[in-house]
Image (tube, grey):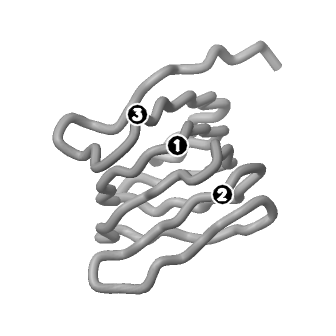
Amino acid sequence: MARVEAEEGAPAEGRLLSGDPKFRTWNVEEAEGGIFAGVWESTPGKWRIAYDEWGFCHILSGVSVITQDGGEARTVKAGDSFVIRPGFTGTWEVLETTRKEYVIRLP
């Protein structure tokens, strides 16, 4: 497998709530039907999130808090896995630099 270079990013304009989070994404797989898989990492900060796609996440390191609008906060850490469904809106707060594996399926 060829070495994958990280793409760098940050929360979209108007979504940042606190801190100065920086993202690195290694998109290692892309398949027909809008399926993507790879590794994502973020430094501490908090921002608004809105998902139109299905997303499976497995936390490799760090600690984050994901809060759905109108719901309870959920702390995720190394070893935790979860699914984010289309229509999910809320916040993602990275308390300790977080790295996750992901699989995304676009609608």
Residue 10: x percent and y percent? Answer: 39, 31
Q: Is residue 72 above or below residue 43?
A: below
Tell me the distance, in whole angstroms, between the alpha carbons under discs 2 and 3: 16 Å
- Quadrant of the image containing the C terminus: bottom left
**Which residue is at a point 28% across and 84% down the rendered structure image?**
70
* Residue furthest out toward the front: 19
The residue under label 1 is 44
Q: Tell me which residue sits at (34%, 70%) in the image.
A: 88
Quadrant for residue 75, please give it.
Answer: bottom right
Residue depicted at 65% across the width and 39% down the height: 38
Most foreground residue, 78 or 107: 78
| Type of amino acid at the residue the image marks with label 3 | Asp
Q: Nearer the viewer, residue 34 or 99?
A: 99
Indicate which disc residue 20 carries: 3
Horizontal side of residue 104 vs 3, given as left or right: left
Q: Which percent across, then down, holds residue 61?
A: 76, 49
At 49% from the left and 21% from the top, the residue drawn is 8
Compared with residue 31, is residue 2 higher up or lower down, i.e. above or below? Answer: above
Q: Quadrant of the N terminus?
A: top right
* Label 1, label 2: how far apart the Cα atoms are: 9 Å
User: SS for tag 1?
Assistant: loop
In-image side of 83 versus 29 (left or right): left
- Relative side of 43 to 47, left or right: right
| Amino acid bearing label 1 | Pro
Q: Element under label 2?
A: strand
Left or right of residue 30, residue 80 in this image: right
Query: Measured along the vertical axis of the image, is residue 12 above or below residue 2?
Result: below
